[in-house]
Image (cartoon, grey):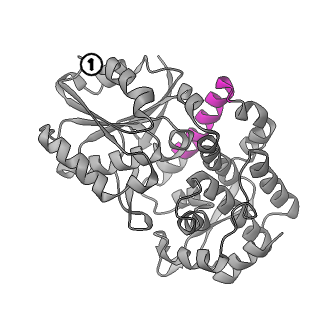
């Protein structure tokens, strides 16, 4: 059996995150979810389906009451209510009821769409996460945040809905493009920056093996990152407090992502956002200049693009931050660093602070 971490809510175990190098343990784990008496729907997208859908179907065939699958067109542009509506219609036609189960097979878009569908279909049914991208494995599959974009506003419609289990097959990372892999590294580096300076140093020391996708190193890295997110989520399951620290780099990252009309990956935009937030931290007298250069160098050694690679209109990006869904009382909950490994929530970052970060060299 693969190893696991258990996520708790109010000190009660609510689901496990399983780590493996294949899908062989999946049938046994889903049997524990009672799938013999349940209809199961695998939701995936057009890039992932040719790689893993048949394998998952073969693993589950004959082990559940009924097995169907839904494949939608790949891409962030599909993360909307139209895709959710399409899934609703297929579930209704297949007579899915409240005891049935959805399985999200794919990256963050698939997990968010499937989770939101599960949260709202018949006022809530169970779902399972099988994340196949690095970004989904260490971030979006954990913690129960689900949602879709509305027009150009990212994740504006959503719900908290915890999965019944998360199954991480590290071997799926071998099929990722370099761009997708680097996208996931944005969230991983962020974990070290906000919570664990030793982990941040370990990432730098092992960057060659990480980029070579050494499975042993990837397994350790993913497990540590998942554990960091697990602890944060347990302490603040619905983002009333410290869970907001996970948004380090996201305020400006999301705004850049929107400005570039999704032409740059989420993780790449988060990486740029982390560097900008680090500059703001430095300008406010928190992190040292050495720490700032260390952070920027870390993103550079992992191959992240910079603002020089994809120039943006700083004023337009800053204007987009005013639509940030994390606004409270008209103020942005901006995440900054006291030092590497110690983040804090700030509510008095103003546009001029952001503008100076764009101008820093």
Picture quadrant where residue 252 is located: bottom right
Taking 108 as reference, is 211 above or below it? above
Look at the image and give the residue range highlighted in magenta: 213-230
Query: Which residue is at the front of the view, 181 or 330?
Result: 181
Left or right of 42? Residue 335 is: right
At x 43%, y 48%, the residue is 109
**Residue 11 visible in the current orientation:** no
Residue picked out by circle 1: 61
Residue lying farthest to the right in this orientation: 290
Give coordinates of residue 213: x percent, y percent: 67, 29
Please check the rendered image and state whether residue 224 is part of the magenta-colored stretch, yes or no: yes
Q: Is residue 57 above or below residue 186?
A: above
Most foreground residue, 212 or 207: 212
Secondary structure category for the residue under label 1? loop
Image quadrant containing the C terminus: bottom right
Is the stretch drawn in magenta largely helix, strand or loop? helix
Left or right, 197 with respect to 229, comes to right
**Quarter where residue 94 is shown:** top left
Q: Is residue 221 magenta?
A: yes
Instruction: Please state if 137 lies on the left or on the right of 297 as rendered.
Output: left
Residue at position x 56%, y 63% from top?
257
299 vs 319: above or below: above
In the rendering, at what x and y percent does residue 219 appear? 61, 28
Residue at 76% in and 64% down: 308
Q: Position of residue 157 (x, y in %)?
A: 35, 63
Residue sitting at 50 percent across and 71 percent down? 324
Which sits in the foreground, 181 or 22?
Answer: 181
Residue 205 placed where, x, y %? 81, 37
In-front residue for pair 313/26 = 313
Q: Residues within 10 Å of mark 1 (few under 14, many from 20)?
A: some
Q: Is residue 303 left or right of residue 223?
A: right
Can residue 165 be seen at all in this image of the molecule? Answer: yes
């Amino acid at each position: 059996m693969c190893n696991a971490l258990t996520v708790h809510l109010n000190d009660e175990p609510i689901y496990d995150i399983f780590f493996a190098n294949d899908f062989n343990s999946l049938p046994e784990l889903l049997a524990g979810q009672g799938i013999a008496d349940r209809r199961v729907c695998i939701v995936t997208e057009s890039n992932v389906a040719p790689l893993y859908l048949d394998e998952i179907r073969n693993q589950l065939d004959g082990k559940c009451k009924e097995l169907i699958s839904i494949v939608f067109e790949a891409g962030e542009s599909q993360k909307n209510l139209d895709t959710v509506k399409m899934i609703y219609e297929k579930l209704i036609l297949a007579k899915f009821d409240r005891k049935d189960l959805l399985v999200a097979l794919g990256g963050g878009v698939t997990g968010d769409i499937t989770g939101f569908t599960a949260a709202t279909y018949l006022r809530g049914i169970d779902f399972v996460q099988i994340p196949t991208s690095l970004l989904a494995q260490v971030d979006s599959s954990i913690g129960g945040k689900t949602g879709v974009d509305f027009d150009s506003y990212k994740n504006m419609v959503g719900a908290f809905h915890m999965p019944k289990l998360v199954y991480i097959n590290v071997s799926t990372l071998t099929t990722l493009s370099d761009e997708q892999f680097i996208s996931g590294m944005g969230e991983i580096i962020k974990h070290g920056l906000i919570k664990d300076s030793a982990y941040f140093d370990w990432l730098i020391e092992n960057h060659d093996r990480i980029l070579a996708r050494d499975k042993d190193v990837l397994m350790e890295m993913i497990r540590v990152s998942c554990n960091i997110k697990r602890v944060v989520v347990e302490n603040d399951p619905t983002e009333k407090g410290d869970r907001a620290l996970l948004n380090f780099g996201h305020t400006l990252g999301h705004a850049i992502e929107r400005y570039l009309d999704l032409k740059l990956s989420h993780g790449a935009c988060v990486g740029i956002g982390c560097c900008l937030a680090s500059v703001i931290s430095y300008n406010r007298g928190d992190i040292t200049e050495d720490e700032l250069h260390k952070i920027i160098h870390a993103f550079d050694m992992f191959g992240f693009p910079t603002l020089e690679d994809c120039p943006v209109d700083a004023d337009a990006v800053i204007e987009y931050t005013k639509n940030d869904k994390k606004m409270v009382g008209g103020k942005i909950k901006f995440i900054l660093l006291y030092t590497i490994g110690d983040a804090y929530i700030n509510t008095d970052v103003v546009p001029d602070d952001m503008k100076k970060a764009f101008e820093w060299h």
